[in-house]
Amino acid sequence: MAIDSRVAKVIREIEAYVERHPNAADTVEGIGSFWLRSAPDVPASVVANALDALVALGIMEKAPDANGQVIYGRANRAA
């Protein structure tokens, strides 16, 4: 299955961000607002699809926070 070019671009941006900030973690909305250079043009659904792909690849992981929101961060990041 081919990845949409918008999703592929967001995947690259997220990978670059976590390379620079290995302990960063945030929600889909936070990642779209603060991690991406192209954020104003990227719908939350595209960010979510990119994160789902990165989770499937084992690059990112997701977990609920104390408030029940899903938080994404780099897999195997330092504690």
Image (cartoon, rainbow, N blue to C red):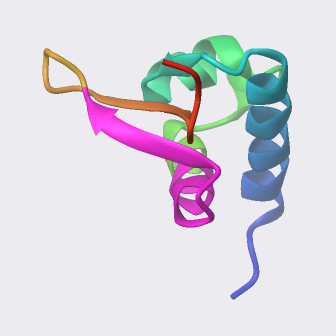
* Left or right: 41 as drawn, with respect to 68: right
Q: Nearer the viewer, residue 9 or 16?
A: 16
Against 45, is 28 above or below? above
Q: Is residue 62 magenta?
A: yes
Considering every residue shown, the one lying at the far bottom of the view is: 1
Give the position of the N terminus as an image quadrant.
bottom right
* Left or right: 67 as drawn, with respect to 34: left
Q: Please name the residue shown 71% across and 23% down the image.
A: 39
Q: Name which quarter of the figure residue 47 lies in.
A: top right
Q: Nearer the viewer, residue 42 or 50?
A: 50
* Residue 19 locus on image (x, y percent): 82, 27
* Residue 17 locus on image (x, y percent): 79, 24
Q: Please name the residue shown 13% across and 16% down the image.
A: 67
Q: How many marks?
A: 0
Q: Nearer the viewer, residue 74 or 8?
A: 74
Against 53, is 38 above or below? above
Q: Is residue 48 magenta?
A: no
Q: Please name the residue shown 75% across and 48% down the image.
A: 11
Q: Nearer the viewer, residue 61 or 52?
A: 61
* Residue 65 locus on image (x, y percent): 23, 21
* Left or right: 27 as drawn, with respect to 67: right
Q: Name which quarter of the figure residue 75 lies in.
A: top right
Considering every residue shown, the one lying at the far left of the view is: 67
Q: Please name the residue shown 76% across and 82% down the image.
A: 2
* Residue 5 locus on image (x, y percent): 83, 61
Residue range in magenta is 49-64
